[in-house]
Image (tube, rainbow, N blue to C red):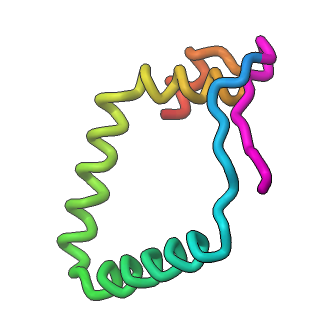
Amino acid sequence: MTTYRTQNPSTGKVDRSWDSLDPREVGTAIDTAEEAFTSWRRTSVEERAGVLARTAHLFEQRAEELAGIAASEMGKPVSQGIAEA
């Protein structure tokens, strides 16, 4: 089994690691994604727009936190991550 990791390129510190999925877990993930897509496809344009607007609002509320994650994963300044959030 392969282990993946997220490493801060500025410090070399491993922030997180996880094992790859086995074939059964991959199948379950694919089935779940297919069910979600089928449900989303039946969702009205108005409801989709509302979900996306709420998502954008959450991103704005958590801009600093998300910028910190981007900085850690990509080795970029937090200020640059905030500008992208």
Q: Residue at x 64, y 25 (%)?
A: 15
Q: Is residue 29 left or right of residue 38?
A: right
Is residue 47 placed above or below 6 in the rendered structure?
Answer: below
Q: Residue at x 77, y 12 (%)?
A: 11
Q: Which residues are magenta?
A: 1-12
Counting from the top left corner in percent of width and height, residue 61 is at 29, 29
Q: Is residue 5 left or right of residue 68?
A: right
Counting from the top left corner in percent of width and height, residue 71 is at 63, 22
Query: Per the image, is 6 magenta?
Result: yes
Counting from the top left corner in percent of width and height, residue 63 is at 41, 27
Is residue 72 placed above or below 60 in the rendered structure?
Answer: above
Q: Residue at x 43, y 23 (%)?
A: 65
- Quarter of the rendering containing residue 56: top left
Counting from the top left corner in percent of width and height, residue 52 is at 31, 57
Query: Per the image, is 66 magenta?
Result: no
Q: Residue at x 35, y 28 (%)?
A: 62
- Most extreme residue toward the top, as rendered? 11
Work out whether residue 37 or residue 67 is closer to the camera in this orientation and state it: 37
Q: Is residue 82 left or right of residue 44?
A: right
* Quadrant for the N terminus in the image: bottom right
Is residue 16 placed above or below 41 in the rendered structure?
Answer: above
The number of discs equals 0
- Quarter of the rendering containing residue 7: top right
